[in-house]
Image (tube, coloured by chain):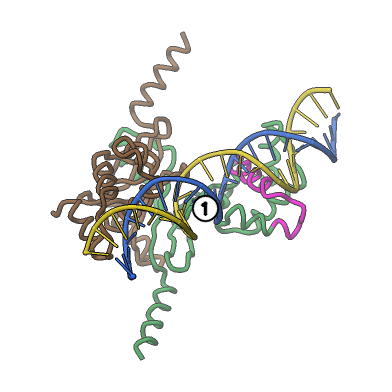
Chain colours: A brown, B green, C blue, D yellow
Amino acid sequence: MKEPLVVFTDYLARKNLKMTPQRRLILEIFLKESGHHTSEDLYNIVKKSDKSIGQATVYRTLKLLCESGLAKEVNFGDGVTRYEQQYGFSHHDHIICEECGKAIAVVDDKIEQLQERLAAEHGFVLTGHEMYLYGICADCRKKDKKLKADTED
Amino acid sequence: MKEPLVVFTDYLARKNLKMTPQRRLILEIFLKESGHHTSEDLYNIVKKSDKSIGQATVYRTLKLLCESGLAKEVNFGDGVTRYEQQYGFSHHDHIICEECGKAIAVVDDKIEQLQERLAAEHGFVLTGHEMYLYGICADCRKKDKKLKADTED
DNA sequence: CTTGCTGCAAAAGGTTTGCACACCG
DNA sequence: CGGTGTGCAAACCTTTTGCAGCAAG
C-alpha cells in the first residue's frame, strides 16, 4: 500500500495542484491525531507547529484529503463536521456514547448485506451509507451507577 | 391514540407553556406537509397563512414539537436540519437518492436486531440510531440511461 | 508571465438569542 | 404585577469565498 503522503501528492498532481508545506503539515497532523476531529480541532493543533497558518487552509486541505480518499467526513449530528482517516481503514460505522461523546468504529458484515438488499427492494442501487448507533458506553453506565449510589447515601 | 394537537397541548401544559395560534398553525402545517422539510420550508408555507409570523417562532416551535415526540430531526448530510413526523409513525431509516434528493422511509427488523447486538458486543446500551442509505433510485437510473442513449446518437 | 497557494477578512447560510412589547391571568 | 409568547434584528457558529500578494515553474 502506498504511503498516504504519496497518495496525496499523486492526487494533487493529477489535479494539477501542488504539495506545499502547509498541506504536508496538515496531512501529517491529521494522520497523527487519529480519531474524529473537527476542522477547528485540527487547526488548533496545526497552529502549534505553524503559527501563521490560516483556518481556510485547513478547511481547504481537509476537503482535498477527502477527495483524495485519505479522509472522510463524519457527522455525529452535533452540527460540526468531523474528519476521520479513511485510507488503509476499511469501511465502518460508529457507535457514539451520548454521555461522554466517545465514538468507536464498528462493522457488521451481515448488516452491510442486509442494507444492500433493503435498498434493492426499493429500487435503489447503493453508493454508500452511514449508520450511527447512539447509546451509553459501559464506562459511563458504571459511573452513573456509582453516582447514583453515592447520592443515595 | 391521542390526537397530535392534544399531545402537543398536554406537553405544553406539562412544561407550563401555552398553546397559541402560532404554535397551532405550525403544528397543523407540519402535519399536513408530510415528508422531510426544513424549518425554512415550513416557514415559507406557514407565512402563506399568517404573513406576520417570524422565523424564530417556527424554529422554536419545531424544537418544541421534537421534545413533545411529535417531530423528529433528520439530517441527510447536506448541512440542513429537516423535520419529519414521528408521532404515530414507527421508527424507520432512510434511503436518499443522491441525484434527485428523494428520500424514502425504510425499516428492516433484522437490521435493527443486529444493531442492538452489535452495540451490546461493544458494551453499549443503545438509546437510538440513525441509518442513511445513499444511492440512486430507479427513476434516476432510467433517466440517466435515456440521457446517455440520447447523447450517443 | 502564468498558474496555483495562502492568509486575511468578509460573506454566507442556518440557527439561536436578546429585547421590547403584547397578552393573559 | 408575574409569567410566557412573539416578531424583529442582531448575534452566533461553522464553513466558504474574494482578493491581494506571494511562490514556483
Q: Determine whether, in the image, residue A13 is placed left or right of residue A48.
A: left
Residue B50 pos. (x, y %): 76, 55
Residue ID at (43%, 17%): A147
Residue B7 appears in the picture as rendered:
no
Q: Determine whether, in the image, residue B1 is placed left or right of residue A94.
A: right
Q: Amino acid at mark 1?
A: Val
Residue ID at (48%, 64%): B101
Q: Is residue B29 magenta?
A: no
Residue B66 appears in the picture as rendered:
yes
Q: Chain of mark 1?
A: B
Q: Which stretch is magenta?
A: B46-68
**Above or below for A54 versus D25:** above
Residue A139 pos. (x, y %): 34, 26
Dividing the picture into quarters, in which one does residue A141 lie?
top left
Q: Which residue is mark 1?
A: B80
Residue B133 pos. (x, y %): 39, 57
The front one of B6 and A102 is A102
The front one of A10 and B152 is A10
**Above or below for C13 versus B16:** below
The front one of A78 and A109 is A78
The front one of A46 and B68 is A46
The C terminus of chain B lies in which quarter of the figure?
bottom left
